[in-house]
Image (cartoon, grey):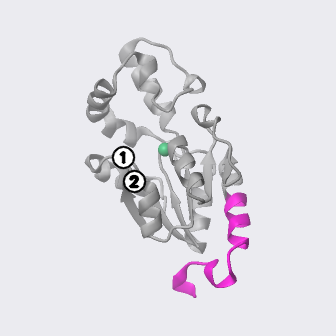
Amino acid sequence: MRIAIDLDNTLLNTSHTCIALFNRLTGIDLAPEDEKHYRYYEFYGWSEEMYEVMYERHGHDIHWDTAPYPNAVEIVKELYSNYELTIMTARPELFSDVTCKSLQHHNIPFHEIRFTRDKYNLCQAMNIDILIDDAPHYAVEFSSKGKSFIIMDQPYNRFVDHNLVKRVTDWHEVRTAVSVMSDTKPPGQRVKEAKS
Ligand SMILES: [Mg+2]
């Protein structure tokens, strides 16, 4: 079985770092639980263009300073030993170096890393069985096209409700959800192809 894992707000607690930084820059006091919309920069009164400027200026520090969620690293290591594992992030290539260095710094293993905003088509092209991600628009797209999805619970994605979308709240639940999905695959496809 092939798995893709998103980084920001799925494997890494990026909101924590972003919001602390943007609060400091703006003097606005936003908490992660106030993040009811995926485009949280609107709470700071920013347009998408203003956010892009801030992100380009501070993205390197944000991505370096952001830590994994509890238990994420040990469970990703387990998944890596049993499945083909791709890190799939919508971060721009501009931050590819700091992204790879940060993953190395936190001892997060992977077989491949891809930078894309078109995750559905890339998962199809790579024969990836399951994407683990927090973004509601991907969950809606995948499930509407008949593809299973594991969604990391966040305040801004709770409106997503579909029988192909499995909601998880921590990395122990990710491990359980992947295990259940793996058990429904034909035996020859359960472990990574290098072993079969
Ligand atoms: Mg994300």
Mark 1 packing: few (<14 Cα in 10 Å), some, or many (20+)? some
| Relative to 135, 74 lies left or right | right
Q: Residue at x 68, y 70 (%)?
A: 182
Reply above or below: 104 against 14: below
For the N terminus, which image quadrant? bottom right
Reply above or below: 25 against 76: above
Q: Which residue is mark 1?
A: 91
Residue 111: image x %, image y %? Answer: 44, 69
- Could you say which is closer to the camera, residue 104 or residue 87? 87
- Could you say which is closer to the camera, residue 40 or residue 164? 164
Residue 173: image x %, image y %? Answer: 71, 52
Q: CA distance from mark 1 to mark 2?
A: 12 Å
Kind of residue at badge 1: Arg
Label 1 residue SS? loop
- Could you say which is closer to the camera, residue 4 or residue 144? 144
Mark 2 packing: few (<14 Cα in 10 Å), some, or many (20+)? few
**Residue 186 in sight in this render:** yes
Kind of residue at badge 2: Asp
Q: Is mark 2 within 8 Å of ligand 1?
A: no
Reply above or below: 44 against 51: above
Q: Residue at x 73, y 72 (%)?
A: 183
Residue stretch rendered in magenta on the structure: 175-196
Q: Which residue is mark 2?
A: 118
Residue 108: image x %, image y %? Answer: 49, 58
